[in-house]
Image (tube, rainbow, N blue to C red):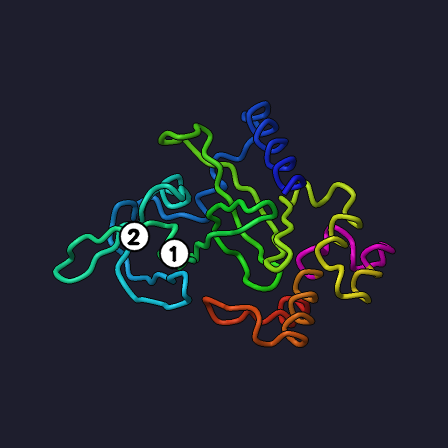
């Protein structure tokens, strides 16, 4: 949790101090502005793992990511039904999966999933104006070991990469050694392939541990490409 909070605080101040250098259009790759406030087909995942198909109100990121705000869904005769996000493990709307990510120290936050697995890759869209309707969002990539709950923003992961990445893949001895030794193909620029290799290994050793809300990614194809 300490590493996660430190990385988050540093990233927040970095974003504030150098806002003029932020790509203010980058977040639009992850949202569809013209669909805000529209009901869209999707599904919710309850905390017990049950998946329920429903229409969901597609809202601005600062609302979808806010764990204190309810998720607006539509049921019979398009009547609104509110779900407290604390009752949900995740939801899927506009072809994006959102989950409640847990971290060391018993904290959590909502993220947009890039790739599921024992180590999950996700996106956090940080509004430039906290607690208000923002002008734009900074795009922050996050990696989380969903078993140990250790998490790093990618910018923080890059600092002392061998040690940080090693702390997330400690139980896969061979991969851990290659990362610690900074072998070719196992450095920071390869972090996504390293995560894919770890997830493949973890699934082979623990086939029923990770619950996938979407079809399991083809990790080997990702590595090969």
The number of numbered badges drawn on the structure is 2
How many residues crowd around disc 2 within 10 Å: few (fewer than 14), some, or many (20 or more)?
some
* Direction top: furthest residue: 17
Asked if residue 29 is positioned above or below residue 117 in the image, the reply reads above
Q: Earlier in the sequence, mark 2 or mark 1?
A: 2
Q: What mark, if any, has residue 83 been given in the picture?
A: 2
Q: Which residue shows up at 55% across the image and 47% down it?
A: 106
**Quadrant where the N terminus is found in the figure:** top right
Quadrant in which residue 69 is drawn: top left
Quadrant in which residue 205 is drawn: bottom right
Residue occupied by mark 1: 88
Q: Is residue 208 left or right of residue 91?
A: right
**Quadrant where the C terminus is found in the figure:** bottom right
Q: Position of residue 98 (x, y in %)?
A: 43, 54
Q: Which residue shows up at 74% across the image and 48% down it?
A: 164
Quadrant in which residue 88 is drawn: bottom left
Asked if residue 54 is positioned above or below residue 162 in the image, the reply reads below
Q: Are marks 2 and 1 in contact (CB under 8 Å)?
A: yes
Work out whether residue 85 or residue 214 is closer to the camera in this orientation and state it.
85
- Tell whether position 186 is magenta: yes
Secondary structure of the residue carrying numbered label 2: strand
Q: What mark, if any, has residue 171 been given in the picture?
A: none
Q: Position of residue 121 (x, y in %)?
A: 58, 55
- Tell whether position 215 is magenta: no
Q: Is residue 35 left or right of residue 144?
A: left
Magenta stretch?
179-193
Secondary structure of the residue carrying numbered label 1: strand
Work out whether residue 1 or residue 24 is closer to the camera in this orientation and state it.
1
Q: Position of residue 117 (x, y in %)?
A: 58, 64
Q: Position of residue 7 (x, y in %)?
A: 64, 37
Rounded to the nearest angstrom, the CA distance separating label 2 from label 1 is 8 Å
């Amino acid at each position: 949790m300490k590493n996660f909070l430190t990385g988050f605080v540093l990233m927040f101040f970095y974003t504030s101090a150098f806002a003029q250098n932020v790509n203010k259009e980058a977040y639009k790759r992850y949202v569809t502005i013209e669909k805000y406030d529209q009901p869209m087909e999707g599904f919710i995942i309850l905390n017990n793992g049950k998946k329920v198909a429903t229409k969901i109100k597609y809202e601005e990121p600062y609302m979808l990511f806010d764990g204190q705000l309810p998720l607006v869904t539509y049921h019979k005769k398009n009547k609104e039904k509110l779900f407290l996000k604390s009752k949900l493990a995740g939801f899927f709307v506009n072809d994006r999966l959102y989950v409640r990510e847990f971290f060391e120290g018993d904290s959590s936050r909502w993220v947009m999933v890039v790739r599921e697995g024992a180590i999950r890759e996700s996106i956090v869209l940080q509004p430039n104006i906290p607690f208000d309707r923002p002008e734009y969002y900074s795009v922050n990539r996050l990696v989380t070991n969903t078993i140990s709950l250790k998490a790093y923003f990618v910018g923080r992961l890059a600092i002392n990469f061998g040690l940080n990445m090693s702390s997330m893949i400690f139980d896969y001895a061979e991969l851990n050694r290659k990362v610690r030794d900074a072998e070719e193909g196992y450095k920071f620029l390869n972090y996504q392939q390293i995560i894919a290799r770890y997830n493949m290994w973890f699934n082979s050793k623990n086939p029923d541990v990770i619950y996938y809300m979407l079809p399991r990614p083809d990790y080997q194809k990702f590595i090969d490409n």
